[in-house]
Image (tube, grey):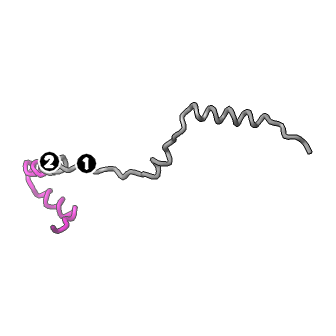
Amino acid sequence: MNSVSVDALVQKFEILPAQAQKEVYDFVEFLVEKQEPRKEKIDKKKILLGMSYWDREDIKIIDDVKNHMNKWKPEAF
């Protein structure tokens, strides 16, 4: 199928009577509606990086241990 330029299409559309323009518009709407919706490109890397296997309890335990370790005073040599 030959590529149709938008300008050529608009020129032909503009010379049509109003009723014919409405028919063209309705037909284009019909074609758009019957198209399958485009699938959005999924950024799998972003999804994987955003996943976490840690829940709030796990993080709380780690924070508690970190806070406890920060209180340790190393022996002076």
Q: Judge by depth and name the residue closer to the eye, 5 or 51.
A: 51
29 relative to 17 in the view: left or right: right
Q: Residue at x 20, y 50 (%)?
A: 35
Q: Residues within 10 Å of mark 1 (few under 14, many from 20)?
A: few
Q: Residue at x 18, y 46 (%)?
A: 33
Quadrant housing the N terminus: bottom left
66 relative to 72 in the view: left or right: left
**Residue to which mark 2 is pinned:** 30
Instruction: Please count the marks in the image.
Output: 2
74 relative to 52 in the view: left or right: right
> In the image as oriented, which residue stretches furthest toward the bottom?
2
Q: Is residue 13 magenta?
A: yes
**Residue 26: image location, x then y, percent:** 13, 47
Q: Amino acid at mark 1?
A: Pro
Q: Residue at x 57, y 31 (%)?
A: 57
Q: Residue at x 42, y 51 (%)?
A: 44
Tell me which segment is drawn in magenta.
1-25
Q: Is residue 8 magenta?
A: yes
Q: Quadrant of residue 2?
A: bottom left
Q: Which mark is residue 37?
A: 1
Q: Amino acid at mark 2?
A: Phe
Quadrant housing the C terminus: top right
Q: Mark 2 to mark 1: distance in Å?
A: 14 Å
Say which element carries label 2.
helix
Q: Judge by depth and name the residue closer to the eye, 52 or 35.
A: 52
